Image (spheres, rainbow, N blue to C red):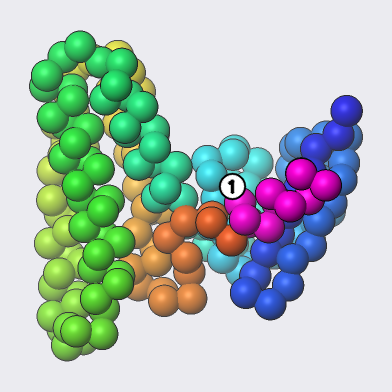
Amino acid sequence: SAWLHVAATPRTTVYLVATGRGFAEAEYLLGADYAGSLAVDGWGPYRHFDQAVIQNCLAHLLRRSHSLQDILRSAESRQWLEAISARLKQALALRDHRNTYSQLGYAIACGRLEAAFDRLLDEPALDDDTLKFAAYLVRRRHELFVFLYDPDVPATNYRAEQAIRPAVVN
């Protein structure tokens, strides 16, 4: 048994096959002092890179929100999750239209989006699974919208996901 690790940039992809899946393997791949940005899927060991800027993958968060919507019986929980998903999608749309705003207008739009998101986090639905997801979002709040302020930081870990597929198939 082994794990396939990948680090991908627009120009380079690096693979590591290792028997473990902890920080030691990620550190071997990236270096202990890695200070770039990481678009991550939620895997805990990435957060040991103290100097890195971390962007939580919005695609993973959207999938988690949708899968919770499918299993929850509470209409209030489903509505809250729909609102969370809507704000995450709004952030992606804002990123895609960054150039249509003035610098000030973009900053205001980002602030309004984040304020609306924070209001949702202040009042999550009282379903156990929803509360667990809300707690995760609160803990990772500083990692959710990095891509809005740094155009070089991707909103998802799509590049790494796509880089790993052919290697897994082969």
- Residue ID at (13%, 73%): 108
Q: Which residue is mark 1?
A: 47
Res 150 visible? yes
Res 26 visible? no
x then y, percent, for residue 58: 40, 50
> Residue type at mark 1?
Arg
The image shows residue 88, relative to residue 67, as above or below, that is below
The magenta stretch spans which residues? 160-170
Of the 4 image quadrants, the one containing the N terminus is top right
- Residue ID at (30%, 61%): 92
Horizontal side, residue 41 vs residue 95: left or right: right
The image shows residue 118, relative to residue 29, as above or below, that is above
- Residue ID at (59%, 61%): 159
The image shows residue 26, relative to residue 92, as above or below, that is above
Horizontal side, residue 53 vs residue 109: left or right: right
**Viewer-proximal residue among 128 and 72:** 72
Does dot 1 land on a helix, a strand or a loop?
helix
Q: How many discs mark residues in the rendered view?
A: 1
x then y, percent, for residue 164: 70, 51
**Viewer-proximal residue among 76 and 132:** 76
x then y, percent, for residue 156: 47, 56
- Residue ID at (12%, 19%): 75
